């Protein structure tokens, strides 16, 4: 199929993955973004949970695609997305759902990655039950219990003792899962692009994980710090290239994210791989925009034969913090999506509307989700520079800012009210 690069869109529940990319957007929730100063975006009213598949079911979206779109990219494809797109004559620029879902399955990844020689923590996989528990107790605790599929740490649980592990196995009995020996070190994430001709790997970043002021998930990702150096960068890159080659042999094309832990003595462990668009994509897009070079989504599309593949390296100098909802959301919050600055005490000061082009160099971008629920993303802050001090704690200015944003978006929790 011949694709006109001007007839390609990003389609998804919200426009976040396309920020800074110059890619038009069809979405269910515009998150308060301005329509000025960049590629167009369209919002379609939906009932029920937002998803790419649900959006594609809408007659208005189907009419728009039939008449004006040759190809689309989504956050994560599915069999239904692929079926509807095929009926509409539109190419889906994502790895086939069958391949991506298999790779992203934590049980499958542990087995296959270990067989491919990638450094995976000591692990047992199978169906939660007495037999798996007996096998898992051969490992040294503490443990990490994960269901086969999960997002942002929602289905990942730490178990500090054999009793806690046994309770998790009982709670999720009959579900496919992975039980791993918890490895201690610095959490790292690396973003790259796989194509038939090239393996493109960006710089690694510190992955903020389980910060209670940002997320209710003890092992959930809640930000990317591209302003601090990572340990063992050369070894991390080598492992990532090996993983990217493994992904290509598995049939994956396009963007991927690899989560690693680097131990105090330099040991590197592959935790999981995400064969899809990932949270760091807007940060790479903003950096490429600043440099006037093709962005990561352009490289992603090129891996599917859409547009030329540029001989550029992936770079990133933007960071982000992701605030997850804890309690009840305020109906009329005091803050909304905007671009602005951060004062020395940590107050976000809005200076104007934020559009798809994203915040400009020297600015801070705040994007507030139009709809959210406890445990899911509430807001996101884009900025240049580091997130954390060397000890891993949030910089005081950012800690204060995120606390104030939460107070402006959520009602105080009962626990806070009592204290």
Image (cartoon, helix red, strand yellow):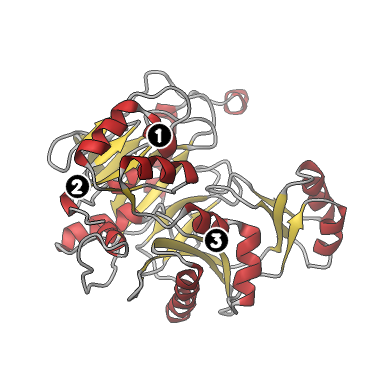
**Mark 3 vs mark 2: which is more N-terminal?**
2
Q: Which residue is mark 3?
A: 103
| 271 relative to 166 in the view: left or right | left
Residue 49 location, x and y as percent? 47, 29
Q: Secondary structure at mark 1?
A: helix
Viewport quadrant of the C terminus: top right
Would you call the spot at circle 3 few (<14 residues within 10 Å), some (14-19), or many (20 or more)?
Answer: many
**Mark 2 vs mark 1: which is more N-terminal?**
2
| 289 relative to 95 in the view: left or right | left
Between 82 and 100, the one lying in front of the other is 82
Residue 171: image quadrant is top right
Q: Secondary structure at mark 2?
A: helix
**Mark 3 vs mark 1: which is more N-terminal?**
3
**Placement of 367 over or under 111, stated as above or below:** above
Viewport quadrant of the N terminus: bottom left
Query: Is residue 32 visible from the viewing direction of this image?
Result: no
Q: Work out how far the residue at label 3 is from the one at label 2, CA to CA, in angstroms.
A: 30 Å
Between 251 and 43, the one lying in front of the other is 251
Q: Which mark is residue 86?
A: none
Residue 414 location, x and y as percent? 60, 23
**Placement of 88 over or under 291, stated as above or below:** above
Which residue: 27% across, 72% down?
313
Q: Which mark is residue 404?
A: 1
Of the two numbered discs 2 and 1 in the rendering, the one whose residue sits closer to the viewer: 2
Q: Which residue is mark 2?
A: 7
Residue 104 location, x and y as percent? 55, 57
Query: Is residue 296 visible from the viewing direction of this image?
Result: yes
Which residue: 30% across, 63% down?
316
Would you call the spot at circle 2 few (<14 residues within 10 Å), some (14-19), or many (20 or more)?
Answer: some
Q: Work out how far the residue at label 3 is from the one at label 1, CA to CA, in angstroms.
A: 39 Å
């Amino acid at each position: 199929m011949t694709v006109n690069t001007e007839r390609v869109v990003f389609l998804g529940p919200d426009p976040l993955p396309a920020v800074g990319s110059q890619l038009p957007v069809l979405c269910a929730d515009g998150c308060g973004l301005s329509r000025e100063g960049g590629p167009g975006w369209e919002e379609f009213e939906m009932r029920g949970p937002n998803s790419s598949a649900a959006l594609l079911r809408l007659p208005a979206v189907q009419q728009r695609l039939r008449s004006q779109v040759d190809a689309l990219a989504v956050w994560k494809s599915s069999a239904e997305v692929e079926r509807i797109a095929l009926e509409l004559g539109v190419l889906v620029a994502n790895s086939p759902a069958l391949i991506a879902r298999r790779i992203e399955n934590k049980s499958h990844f542990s087995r296959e990655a270990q067989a491919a020689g990638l450094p995976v923590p000591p692990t047992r996989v199978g169906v939660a039950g007495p037999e798996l528990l007996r096998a898992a107790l051969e490992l040294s605790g503490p443990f990490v219990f994960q269901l086969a599929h999960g997002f942002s740490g929602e289905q990942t649980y730490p178990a500090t003792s054999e009793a806690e592990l046994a309770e998790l196995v009982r709670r999720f009995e009959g579900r496919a899962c992975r039980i791993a020996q918890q490895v201690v070190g610095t959490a790292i994430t690396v973003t790259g692009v796989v194509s038939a001709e090239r393996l493109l790997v960006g710089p690694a970043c510190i992955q903020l994980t389980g910060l209670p002021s940002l997320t209710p998930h003890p092992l959930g990702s809640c930000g990317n710090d591209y302003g601090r150096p990572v340990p063992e960068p050369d070894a991390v890159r080598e492992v990532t290239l090996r993983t990217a080659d493994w992904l290509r042999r598995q049939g994956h094309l396009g963007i991927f994210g690899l989560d690693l832990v680097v131990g105090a003595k330099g040991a590197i462990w592959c935790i999981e791989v995400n064969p899809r668009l990932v949270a760091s994509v807007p940060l790479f897009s903003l950096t490429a925009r600043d440099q006037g070079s093709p962005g990561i989504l352009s490289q992603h599309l090129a891996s599917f034969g859409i547009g030329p593949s540029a001989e550029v390296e992936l770079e990133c100098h933007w960071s982000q913090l992701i605030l997850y909802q804890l309690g009840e959301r305020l109906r009329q919050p005091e803050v909304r999506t905007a671009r602005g600055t951060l004062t020395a005490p940590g107050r976000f000061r809005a200076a104007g509307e934020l559009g798809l082009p994203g915040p400009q160099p020297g600015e801070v971008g705040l994007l507030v989700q139009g709809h959210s629920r406890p445990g899911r993303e509430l807001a996101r802050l884009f900025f240049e520079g580091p997130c954390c001090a060397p000890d891993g704690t949030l910089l005081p200015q950012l800690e204060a800012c995120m606390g104030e944003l939460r107070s402006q978006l959520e009602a105080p929790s009962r626990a806070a009210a009592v204290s």
